[in-house]
Image (cartoon, helix red, strand yellow):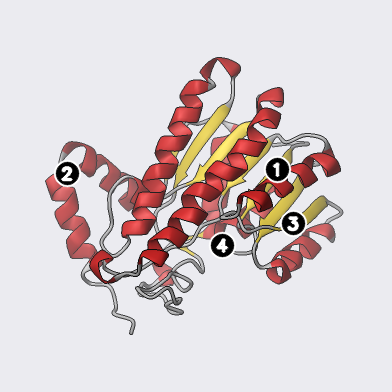
């Protein structure tokens, strides 16, 4: 990962922010995007102090025109794209039969369509340099999680979309990585949408027991560098994926029992 032009969506916090700091070396040129330009600029300024080339672009990936502008500005600034990391995402926590449909739409628009839109405009440039297309998915993209119907659906959709792109471009040497972290200490659970679309503000889980965003970022960068197709993180995450493949009923019962112990947040 040297002298690369790298776009990171959702770079203002969590895994995206950790990726930005971890990649701010070796002559890389970073393009950071997020909806919250205030937080994004704070990340950018910290990186600029290390004399790295970095720009920040306010982007709502659920809007196709925003994604088009993100790619156009990257090309205008740096002339190419070597790596696109589709990291922007939101979660939700509510039973489907109690959730407003707007919540489902919002999660899908950000997590799935945001990946589609950015990939659509970046792909021709990635193909020119035989670059890397990365999707930050989730264990929820392998097994449906209770009270996360929209989140799981969006990650299943992302996985299928990226696998199709990998197949289509197999002979063009495009690298496609689907990275599936387990539970990661970040802001995503605090900003997760409740049944009426308002953020739940507090995490129902013990964040201190989770893998850090810094550790996840390190694993993702290694997977990009090694041209891996998939990355599944945490021992529990790997176990769940394996169980769901060979013993799906057991996996679903374990998932149900595990999530039923979550703290209720009113």
Q: Which residue is mark 3?
A: 57
Q: Position of residue 67 (x, y in %)?
A: 65, 48
Pick whichever, 255 or 51, lies toward us.
Answer: 255
Disc 1/disc 4 C-alpha distance (Å): 17 Å
Pick whichever, 60 or 256, lies toward us.
Answer: 60
Q: Secondary structure at mark 2?
A: helix
Chain-order first, disc 1 or disc 2: 1
In this view, the residue farthest toward the top is: 171
Residue shown at 56% from the left, 55% from the top:
62
The quadrant of the image that shows the N terminus is: top right
Q: Is residue 162 above or below residue 32?
A: above
Q: Residues within 10 Å of mark 1 (few under 14, many from 20)?
A: many
Q: Is the C-beta separation of discs 2 and 3 under 8 Å?
A: no
Disc 3/disc 4 C-alpha distance (Å): 17 Å
Q: Which residue is mark 2?
A: 248
Marks 2 and 3: which is nearer the front?
3
Q: Quadrant of residue 39?
A: bottom right
235 sits to left or right of 244: right
Disc 2/disc 3 C-alpha distance (Å): 42 Å
Residue shown at 52% from the left, 43% from the top:
135
Q: Position of residue 27 (x, y in %)?
A: 81, 41
Pick whichever, 114 or 262, lies toward us.
Answer: 114
Q: Secondary structure at mark 3?
A: strand
Q: Which residue is mark 1?
A: 6
The quadrant of the image that shows the C terminus is: bottom left
- Whether residue 249 is visible to the viewer of this picture, yes or no, is yes
61 sits to left or right of 81: left
Disc 2/disc 4 C-alpha distance (Å): 31 Å
């Amino acid at each position: 990962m040297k002298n690369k032009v790298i776009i990171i969506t959702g770079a203002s916090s969590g895994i995206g922010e950790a990726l930005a700091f971890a990649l701010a070396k070796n002559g890389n040129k970073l393009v950071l995007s997020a909806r919250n330009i205030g937080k994004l600029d704070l990340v950018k300024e910290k990186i600029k102090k290390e004399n790295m080339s970095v720009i920040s672009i306010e982007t709502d990936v659920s809007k196709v025109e925003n994604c088009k502008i993100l790619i156009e500005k990257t090309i205008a600034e740096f002339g190419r794209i070597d790596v696109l990391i589709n990291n922007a995402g939101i979660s939700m926590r509510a039973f489907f039969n109690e959730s407003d449909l707007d919540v489902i739409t919002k999660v899908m628009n950000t997590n799935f369509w945001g990946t589609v839109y950015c990939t659509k405009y970046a792909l021709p440039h990635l193909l020119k340099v035989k670059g890397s297309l990365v999707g930050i998915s989730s264990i929820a993209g392998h097994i449906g999680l209770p009270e996360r119907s929209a989140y799981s659906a969006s990650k299943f959709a992302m996985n299928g979309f990226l696998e199709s792109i990998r197949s289509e471009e197999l002979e063009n040497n495009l690298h496609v990585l689907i990275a599936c972290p387990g539970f990661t200490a970040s802001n995503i659970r605090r900003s997760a949408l409740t049944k009426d679309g308002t953020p739940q503000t507090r995490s129902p889980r013990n964040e201190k027991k989770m893998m850090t965003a810094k550790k996840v970022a390190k694993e993702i960068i290694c997977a990009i560098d090694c041209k891996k197709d998939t990355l599944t993180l945490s021992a529990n995450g790997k176990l769940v994926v394996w169980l769901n493949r060979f013993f799906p009923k057991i996996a679903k019962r374990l998932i149900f029992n595990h999530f039923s112990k979550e703290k209720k947040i009113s």
